[in-house]
Image: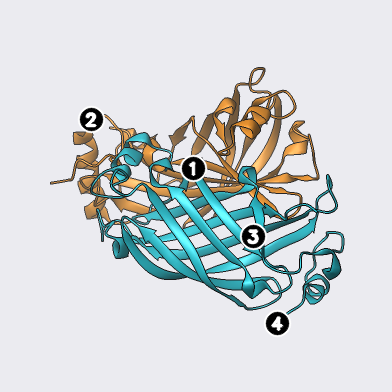
Chain colours: A orange, B cyan
Amino acid sequence: MRPDAPNTPVRSARSAARALALLAALGGSLAWAAPAAAYRWEMDRSHSQVKFAVDHLGYSLVHGWFREFDADIDLDPDAVERASVSFRIRADSVDTNWEGRDRYLRGPDFLDAEAHPVISFVSTRVRLVSAEVADITGDLTINGVTRSETLRAALNKYGPSALAGGEVVAGFTISGEIDRTAYGVSFAAPHVGKDVEIRVDLEISPRP
Amino acid sequence: MRSIRSFLSAAALASPAVLASDLPAAAEPWIMDREKTAVTFSLEHIGFSLVEGRFRDFDAAIDFDPVAQTASSVSFSIAAKSIDTDWGARDDFIRGDDMLDVEAHPRITFVSSDVRMLSDTEATVTGLVTIKGVSREETFDVVLNGMSPSTEDPGVTLAAFTVTGEVDRSDYGVSAFAPAVATTMALRVDIAARSPGR
């Protein structure tokens, strides 16, 4: 029934998720009564990306990804402001499609991935701005420096996915801008911009 | 025909002035800076998220005339198998027969035929896109982000462009999972190039 496509979300034990999907389809919106297990969500890595962009010399944008990351999400759709989110990103997984630059970014003048292998974000507060947008404040740690940052999370869509056998998916875009020099990642600023635009696209499903 | 002088006065760029007299007199082959050039695209994943992808391997030939900009031309040749959407299994599928069929059609190309200026820094470029053996005329938007002398060699001018547009993959027979998965793909090519030295 569902095509066995290579972009099928990678998840275990779908049957419980299907039962939840049925409940969600009947319930409709975010306010469905879900069992406690639905508060833990699992990330679909095949439809999640950690992206960033930096200005270079004022006019050439360099974009990159971090290819290795995972997320822990505790979210009760009925009590969004009690949610907690944490991300772990491998600093050495930076990829700007130019090995010479990536090697430099991993090195001691930039991310210093050997000394600080994980970039992490742990939420401390979630504040709803509207029904579908929340500001997530949390501790971001880069290059061994921890600072509080606020990122904006927009819910793109929430409901059964036609391409995943009706499984419930919540899709978000989390965006923000950070000043890398505040984390000691200052080399070549301001020639190479200090402001890094971040965009994380994330698809999650309730854990079975 | 706009002159480079009016571009420099009109645009609020924080870069040192480049005199029209310093620039080459006609369209010349500029050299693409591969390190700062990127071919990227994005596709809506049924409304849940935006999946970004890139082609990692490509060449470009750029003939640029900063004074008579409509005389400029650009062509791109992209290795179809270099597709990268940050998920190996999906990339393998996209390389296959149902999608790009990279064995039969190893290159995706664009050859420009027309440049139309909209302002001193914006233009549209029309040309032939060839994907999976199908060629179609497409038009893209181009913005000249900036132009300035190289700090290493003042006789060389650096320029950066962003090309954006949309392509419907089903026009090229790359239709798998349509219409559930969108056929409209947003393209973005960031180009950095430098003039030939004197």
Q: Secondary structure at mark 3?
A: strand
A38 or B10, which is in the foreground?
A: B10
**Residue at the spot x=40%, y=49% of the render?**
A171
Amino acid type at mark 3: Phe
- Specify the subunit that label 1 lies on: B
Q: Position of residue A50 (x, y in %)?
A: 52, 40
Amino acid type at mark 2: Ala
Q: Residue furthest top?
A: A115
User: Do we see residue A171 in this rendering?
Assistant: yes
Closer to the observer: label 1 or label 2?
Answer: 1
User: Few, some or many C-alpha atoms within 10 Å of disc 3 (few <14, some 14-19, many ≥20)?
Assistant: many
Is A107 placed left or right of A200 in the picture?
right
Specify the quadrant that holds the N terminus of chain B: bottom right
Does label 1 lie on the same chain as label 3? yes
Amino acid type at mark 4: Met
Q: Position of residue B140 (x, y in %)?
A: 51, 68
Query: Could you give the CA–CA distance between mark 1 and mark 2, rounded to whole angstroms?
Result: 38 Å
**Residue at the spot x=29%, y=32% of the render?**
A11
Nearest to N terminus: mark 4 or mark 1:
4
Q: Secondary structure at mark 4?
A: loop
B76 lies above or below A201: below
User: Few, some or many C-alpha atoms within 10 Å of disc 1 (few <14, some 14-19, many ≥20)?
Assistant: some
- Specify the subunit that label 3 lies on: B
Query: Could you give the CA–CA distance between mark 3 and mark 1, rounded to whole angstroms?
Result: 19 Å
What's the mark number on residue B131? none
Closer to the observer: label 2 or label 4?
Answer: 4
Q: Which residue is mark 2?
A: A13
Q: Which residue is mark 4?
A: B1
Is B115 placed left or right of B149 in the picture?
left
Q: Which residue is mark 1?
A: B57
Query: Could you give the CA–CA distance between mark 2 and mark 4, rounded to whole angstroms?
Result: 64 Å
